[in-house]
Image (cartoon, grey):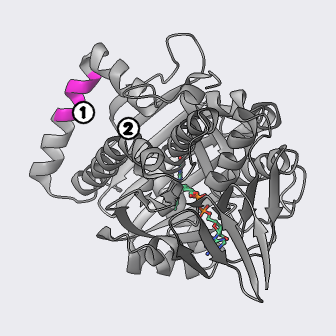
């Protein structure tokens, strides 16, 4: 049996796992040994310029603080050419058949320092940039096609197994495994689940008219329909529907699918032309009851899966990354055990409240808006109308969406801890 030794094992080389590897490398100047194990190849298949027939057609709405994290980690120059700044967010709430869609709430997400509070980047570019940065990060080893299939959590270390007699021994193991986490289950961490009975449909379109940086969230009874602007007047459509109807749309022929999409997009920018594959995500939502267990920390979707309504899932995951990197580097500088209960509790304390309250808020927004009850429609119209008339409240909303409120870790403020 071969045993690899490392300081920190990150199980999962998705967005959160790769970002954490780069962050740990940067804050420790390569002084920590970090191994990233992913069940997939971790190659560079999605390099910019490759054809768009990608398995993940999603685009991510990055908050201002996530952008700052990427700047501090030196990843932003690879992303900037592919990022679309959002100049205005419009929320609308009218029946599908309505000819006119009055805007309930409209705001400019630009931050007080003039920098964009929201930027949209296609996931293929995000993944390529993170992979390239992780590959070049001092102290980081990428171990592709390594599915962690078990772990023994000991007093002084954790021993993770990866099949074929391979093991990795680490002082701390981080589960960045996404929604299905073997390590989370192995450590006995329970989930609070919330079945949404919705699926998220995602595709890319070419708009007929310039979007000028406008992002739209149109609330419909089946679920929210979002248009996220991309460079060159393309847009990523992120569209939630009741599961049965949504699965039918995913299986429909391109003409039927495009017609349903254009009905929801309306005629301000459409009719739009399909410009990429479509894919669906089951939106089963949960939150882990604990973010840590002995020698284990959860980050990203392993810690919680939130509704995409606010485009905040990865932004929350990046806040985990920044907070964990900060507590780990503090411990390393003090010569403490990186996986000790003190370090893990410090991480949990920094992240639990923000994580739980955000997940609950996104779920509540989705429930309030995903129905067609006239009384509720009137009440929510009144509610957003109030927000629209209160500039102070709007500015707070902008700050919240940009990840600028509460306990903001140093890396998200653009500061190296
Ligand atoms: C429709 C939709 C739209 C979204 N839009 C936005 C948005 O606009 N803004 C935003 O911030 N967020 C958004 N999100 C959320 C965001 O996509 C997720 O939060 C993010 O992808 C989670 O990243 P992750 O690295 O935690 O997990 P994942 O991306 O799921 O990565 C997990 C990785 O772990 C690997 N893995 C799993 N198990 C093991 C194992 N045992 N051993 C080794 N490797 C393993 C997998 O191969 C995978 O590479 C959206 C989500 C959906 C579904």
Which label is found at residue 384? 1
The residue lying furthest to the bottom in this view is 164
Which of these two is toward me, 253 or 83? 83
Q: Which residue range is magenta in the image?
A: 383-388
**Quadrant of the image where one finds ligand 1:** bottom right
Of residue 17 and residue 369, the one placed in the foreground of this image is: 17
The local secondary structure at tag 1 comes to: helix
Is 319 contained in the magenta span? no
Mark carried by residue 244: none
Q: Quadrant of the N terminus?
A: bottom right
Decide which of 57, 290 is in the foreground and name it.
Answer: 290
Instruction: Tell whether label 1 touches label 2 (CB within 8 Å).
Output: yes
Inspect this view and state whether residue 207 appears: no
Residue ID for mark 2: 91
Q: Position of residue 377 (x, y in %)?
A: 18, 48
Vertical comparison of 68 with 187: above or below? above
- The tag earlier along the polypeptide, 2 or 1, is 2
How far apart marks 2 and 1 lie (CA) works out to: 9 Å
Residue 193 image offset from top left, x and y in percent: 30, 69
Residue placed furthest toward the top: 113
Q: Is residue 216 above or below residue 399?
A: below
């Amino acid at each position: 049996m071969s045993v690899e030794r490392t300081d920190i094992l990150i199980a999962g080389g998705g967005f959160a796992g790769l970002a954490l590897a780069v962050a740990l490398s940067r804050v420790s100047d390569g002084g920590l040994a970090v191994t990233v194990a992913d069940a997939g190849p971790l190659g560079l298949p999605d390099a910019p310029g490759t054809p768009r027939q990608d398995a993940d057609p999603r685009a991510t709405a990055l908050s201002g603080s996530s952008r700052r994290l990427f700047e501090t980690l030196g990843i932003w120059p690879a992303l900037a050419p592919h990022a679309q700044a959002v100049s205005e967010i419009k929320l609308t709430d009218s029946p599908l058949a309505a000819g006119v869609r009055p805007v309930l709430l409209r705001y400019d997400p630009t931050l007080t320092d003039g920098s964009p509070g929201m930027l949209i980047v296609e996931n293929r570019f995000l993944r390529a940039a993170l992979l390239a940065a992780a590959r070049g990060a001092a102290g980081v080893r990428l171990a592709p096609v390594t599915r962690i299939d078990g772990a023994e959590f000991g007093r002084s270390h954790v021993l993770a197994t990866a099949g074929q007699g391979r093991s990795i021994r680490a002082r701390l193991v981080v589960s960045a495994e996404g929604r299905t986490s073997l390590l989370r289950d192995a450590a006995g961490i329970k989930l609070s689940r919330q079945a949404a009975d919705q699926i998220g449909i995602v595709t890319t379109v070419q708009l007929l008219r310039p979007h000028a940086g406008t992002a739209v969230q149109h609330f419909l009874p089946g679920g929210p329909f979002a248009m996220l602007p991309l460079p060159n007047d393309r847009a990523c459509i992120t569209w939630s529907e009741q599961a049965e109807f949504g699965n039918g749309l995913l299986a429909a022929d391109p003409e039927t699918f495009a017609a349903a999409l254009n009905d929801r997009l309306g005629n301000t920018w459409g009719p739009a032309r399909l410009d990429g594959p479509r894919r669906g995500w089951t939106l089963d939502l949960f939150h882990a009851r604990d973010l840590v267990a002995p020698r284990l920390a959860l980050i990203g979707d392993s810690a919680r899966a939130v509704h995409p309504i606010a485009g905040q899932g990865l932004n929350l995951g990046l806040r985990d990354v920044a907070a964990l990197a900060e507590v780990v580097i503090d411990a390393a500088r003090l010569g403490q055990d990186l996986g000790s209960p003190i370090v893990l509790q410090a991480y949990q304390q920094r992240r639990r409240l923000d994580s739980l309250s955000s997940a609950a808020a996104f779920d509540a927004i989705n429930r309030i808006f995903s129905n067609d009850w006239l009384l509720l429609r009137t009440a929510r119209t009144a509610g957003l109308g109030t927000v629209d008339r209160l500039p102070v409240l709007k500015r707070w909303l902008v700050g919240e969406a940009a990840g600028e409120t509460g306990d903001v870790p140093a890396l998200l403020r653009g500061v190296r801890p």
